[in-house]
Amino acid sequence: MEIKVCGMRSEVNIKEIQALFLPNYFGFIAYSGSPRYVDPDLLEDLGKIVHRRVQKVLVTVDAPLVD
């Protein structure tokens, strides 16, 4: 079983979760219409504290695909 914790916006929450266990994924919302939206500057800061064994997932809405 794999576990993803999504909607991360807080350094405190990420640290608390990682103190309990390491999920397989942390999800971050890049859709500005969401209450869980994370702006690019905060996203960069939060990404730095995610454990290296946890994959980071970016959730988007109607984002163009990059070739």
Image (spheres, helix red, strand yellow):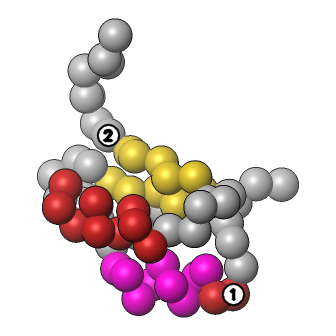
Upstream in the sequence, badge 1 or badge 2? 1
Q: Mark 1 is on which residue type? A: Leu
Eyeballing the image, is 67 above or below 19? above
Task: Determine whether, in the image, residue 15 is placed left or right of residue 7.
Answer: right
Pick the front one: 33 or 48: 48
Q: Position of residue 21 (x, y in %)?
A: 71, 79
Residue under pointer 1: 20
**Which residue in the protein does label 2 denote?**
60
Q: Residue at the location (25% across, 28% down)?
A: 63
Residue 49 is left or right of residue 36, and the answer is: right
Instruction: Please give the range of residues in magenta.
Output: 10-18
Residue in the image at 44% along x and 73% along y: 49
Outermost residue toward the right? 1
What whole-number distance in Å separates the C-alpha atoms at marks 1 and 2? 28 Å
Amino acid carrying label 2: it is: Thr
Q: Could you tell me which residue is drawn at 40 percent across and 67 percent down?
A: 48
Look at the picture and state if 47 lies above or below 19.
above
Q: Is residue 1 visible?
A: yes
For the residue labelled by badge 1, is the local secondary structure a helix, a strand or a loop? helix
| Lateral position of residue 56 relative to residue 54, left or right | left
Q: Are marks 1 and 2 in contact (CB under 8 Å)?
A: no
- Residue 5 visible here: no
Percent across and percent down for residue 22 are: 69, 72
Q: Judging from the image, what secondary structure is the residue with disc 2 in?
A: loop
